[in-house]
């Protein structure tokens, strides 16, 4: 019996649950939507179209056009309203959120822009749908927006929107990282599961061998979940910064998934505690046995 093995076993259980949640958060509509990696706020997309001739090809009501023709103040409420209507007429949703297995989209309710009566805290996401969950999924906003424009039948392309090439280049670079992160989460879940089983088995044995085995498995599990967390953090931070930097002028904004980062690093921390615990257990157990041997009386 080794009652101290309860602590690392519990840590493994926590890490296992958290890493499952990382993988499956948002995999279907309404399941942990807040735990997205990135959310693109596309409600203002097309801000830069306002003065362009492309506007003529959009199905906009005449009064909206007139407002824009008469209002010269670029930042007034009326212009904001026109911007929202332009985005709507493009057929683009208000937001697109990226998860490990899919992406979801929908609209901000009651309105995407806070105003005098609606504070930013009162704005919520209203999900419309999610793409089918799929292994090795990667989030490609360029393709999503392009397909939306194609399907909505407006005669506007990504080029017309002046979609920055740098976003495309950056997202391409992140694709391989995103896929690697998915594979690492799967490996991490398997290793953490094995770690949990070995820890639980160690509750009923006391040999040094089982402690060593636990150290080995938990090192691997810790490395896998740590690396997965680091990669996904890179995608969130790099991708978010990139989109905010280059997307600003076309009205694109990215929100980074802080809750997702919290659970993935939480899982990593839990595995670190389990690992440290098993290392201590191995050393202390070793010393304990040494003392026990030296206490054995010697006979002739
Ligand atoms: C639109 O044109 C007006 C007047 O020509 C100019 O003042 C304004 O800055 C332009 N707005 C945008 C978004 O380009
Ligand atoms: C704020 O937005 C809401 C929802 O679109 C609208 O009903 C309300 O009139 C707006 N308030 C102001 C002061 O513009
Ligand atoms: C949320 O979206 C659904 C359709 O996807 C719609 O029926 C519902 O009215 C929306 N809710 C709000 C508060 O706008
Ligand atoms: C959108 O349409 C263009 C031209 O028809 C085509 O080349 C492009 O592949 C389409 N994009 C998507 C994502 O379907
Ligand atoms: C969406 O982005 C616009 C700027 O592009 C910002 O003003 C607005 O507050 C954002 N809305 C939400 C709900 O994040």
Image: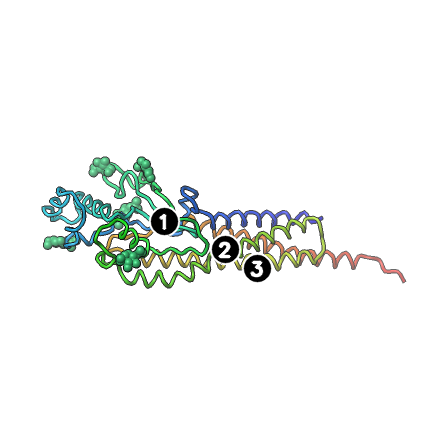
Question: Which comes before the other along the chain, label 3 or label 1?
Answer: 1
Q: Colour scheme in the image?
A: rainbow
Q: Which quarter of the picture shows residue 160?
A: bottom left
Q: Is mark 1 within 8 Å of ligand 5?
A: no
- Taking depth in this image into account, of 200 and 166 the one nearest to the observer is 166
Q: Quadrant of the C terminus?
A: bottom right
The span from disc 1 to disc 2 (Cα, nearest Å) is 19 Å
Q: Is residue 73 left or right of residue 89?
A: left
**Of the residues under marks 1 and 2, which one precedes in the sequence?**
1
User: Which residue is at a point 61% across and 49% down the rendered structure image?
Assistant: 9
Percent position (x, y) of residue 285?
69, 56
**Of 5 and 81, which appears nearest the observer?**
81
- Residue 261 pos. (x, y %): 44, 52
Query: Where residue 273 appears, x then y in whole percent?
Result: 56, 53
Disc 3 and disc 1 in contact, CB within 8 angstroms = no
Q: Residues within 10 Å of mark 1 (few under 14, many from 20)?
A: many
Mark 3 surroundings within 10 Å by alpha-carbon count, few (fewer than 14), some (14 through 19), many (20 or more): some
- Residue under label 2: 185
Question: Seen in the image, is 130 located left or right of residue 294?
Answer: left
């Amino acid at each position: 019996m080794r009652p101290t093995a309860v602590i690392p076993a519990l840590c493994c259980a926590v890490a296992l649950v958290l890493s499952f949640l990382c993988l499956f958060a948002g995999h279907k509509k309404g399941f942990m939507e807040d735990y997205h990696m990135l959310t693109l706020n596309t409600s203002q997309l097309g801000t830069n179209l306002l003065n362009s001739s492309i506007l003529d090809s959009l199905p906009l009501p005449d009064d909206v056009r007139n407002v824009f023709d008469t209002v010269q103040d670029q930042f007034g409420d009326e212009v904001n309203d026109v911007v929202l209507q332009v985005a709507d007429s493009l057929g683009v949703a208000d937001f697109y959120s990226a998860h490990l297995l899919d992406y979801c989209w929908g609209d901000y309710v009651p309105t995407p822009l806070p105003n005098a009566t609606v504070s930013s805290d009162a704005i919520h996401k209203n999900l419309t749908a999610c793409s089918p969950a799929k292994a090795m999924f990667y989030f490609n906003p360029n393709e999503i927006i392009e397909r939306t424009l194609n399907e909505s039948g407006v005669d506007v392309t990504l080029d017309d929107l002046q979609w920055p090439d740098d976003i495309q280049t950056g997202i391409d670079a992140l694709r391989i990282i995103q896929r690697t992160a998915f594979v690492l989460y799967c490996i991490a879940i398997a290793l953490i599961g094995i770690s949990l089983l070995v820890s639980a088995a160690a509750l009923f044995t006391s040999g040094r061998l089982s402690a060593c085995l636990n150290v080995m498995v938990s090192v691997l599990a810790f490395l896998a979940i740590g690396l997965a967390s680091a990669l996904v953090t890179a995608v969130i931070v790099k991708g978010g910064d990139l989109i905010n930097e280059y997307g600003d002028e076309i009205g694109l904004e990215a929100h980074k998934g802080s809750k997702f980062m919290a659970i993935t690093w939480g899982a990593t921390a839990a595995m670190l505690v389990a690992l440290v615990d098993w290392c201590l257990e191995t050393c202390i157990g070793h010393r304990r046995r040494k003392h026990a041997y030296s206490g054995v009386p010697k006979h002739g």
